[in-house]
Image (cartoon, rainbow, N blue to C red):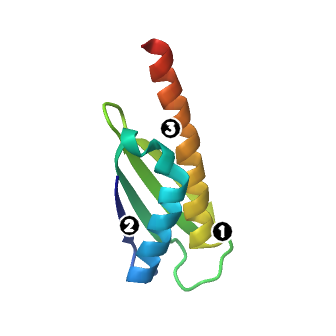
């Protein structure tokens, strides 16, 4: 499972940030690894330097083998919370998708 993390100009894209969020995503989606080809994450701070509450955005696109991608968007107070919530939502949607496949088989 390839994980690609992209940030806007308001979020520092460091090696530590990428490692931290890659580990978090692997923890949430790891059990589905055989069904996922790629996870692409786009992180942004919608209000830049202004402190405006839930303005950290995470768009997570999980590309599923033999199926349509699962796209989740979350706005939260911190980037960490946004990524964690996105990964949890993606895992739930992936579980439903795979269950539908099992039923149809």
Left or right of 13? Residue 89 is: right
Q: Seen from this angle, which residue lies furthest right?
A: 53
Say if residue 103 shows up in the picture.
Answer: yes
Give percent across and percent down for residue 42: 41, 63
| Between marks 1 and 3 in the image, the one whose residue lies nearer the viewer | 3
Give percent across and percent down for residue 39: 38, 53
- Residue highlighted by disc 3: 94
- Residue highlighted by disc 1: 54
Left or right of 103? Residue 67 is: left
Q: Earlier in the sequence, mark 1 or mark 3?
A: 1
Q: Earlier in the sequence, mark 2 or mark 3?
A: 2
For disc 3, the neighbor class at 10 Å (few under 14, some 14 to 19, many from 20) is many
Residue drawn at 50 percent across, 22 percent down: 100
Seen in the picture, residue 68 relative to 20 is either above or below; the reply is above
- Residue highlighted by disc 2: 5
Give percent across and percent down for residue 4: 34, 63
Seen in the picture, residue 6 relative to 62 is either above or below; the reply is below
Q: Earlier in the sequence, mark 2 or mark 1?
A: 2
Quadrant that contains the C terminus: top left
* Mark 1–mark 3 distance (CA, rounded to whole Å): 25 Å
For disc 2, the neighbor class at 10 Å (few under 14, some 14 to 19, many from 20) is some
Q: Seen from this angle, which residue lies furthest top?
A: 104
* Mark 2–mark 3 distance (CA, rounded to whole Å): 19 Å
Say if residue 13 shows up in the picture.
Answer: no
Left or right of 99? Residue 81 is: right
* Mark 2–mark 1 distance (CA, rounded to whole Å): 20 Å
Give percent across and percent down for residue 98: 48, 29
For disc 1, the neighbor class at 10 Å (few under 14, some 14 to 19, many from 20) is some
């Amino acid at each position: 499972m390839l994980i690609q993390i992209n940030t806007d100009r308001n979020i520092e894209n460091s090696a530590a940030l990428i490692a931290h969020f890659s580990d978090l995503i692997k923890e949430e989606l790891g059990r589905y690894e055989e069904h996922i080809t790629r996870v692409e994450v786009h992180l942004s701070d919608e209000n830049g330097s202004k402190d405006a509450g839930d303005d950290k955005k995470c768009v997570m696109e999980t590309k599923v083998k033999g199926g349509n991608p699962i796209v989740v968007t979350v706005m939260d107070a911190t980037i960490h919370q946004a990524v964690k919530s996105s990964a949890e939502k993606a895992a739930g949607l992936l579980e439903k998708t795979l269950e539908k496949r099992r039923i149809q088989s």
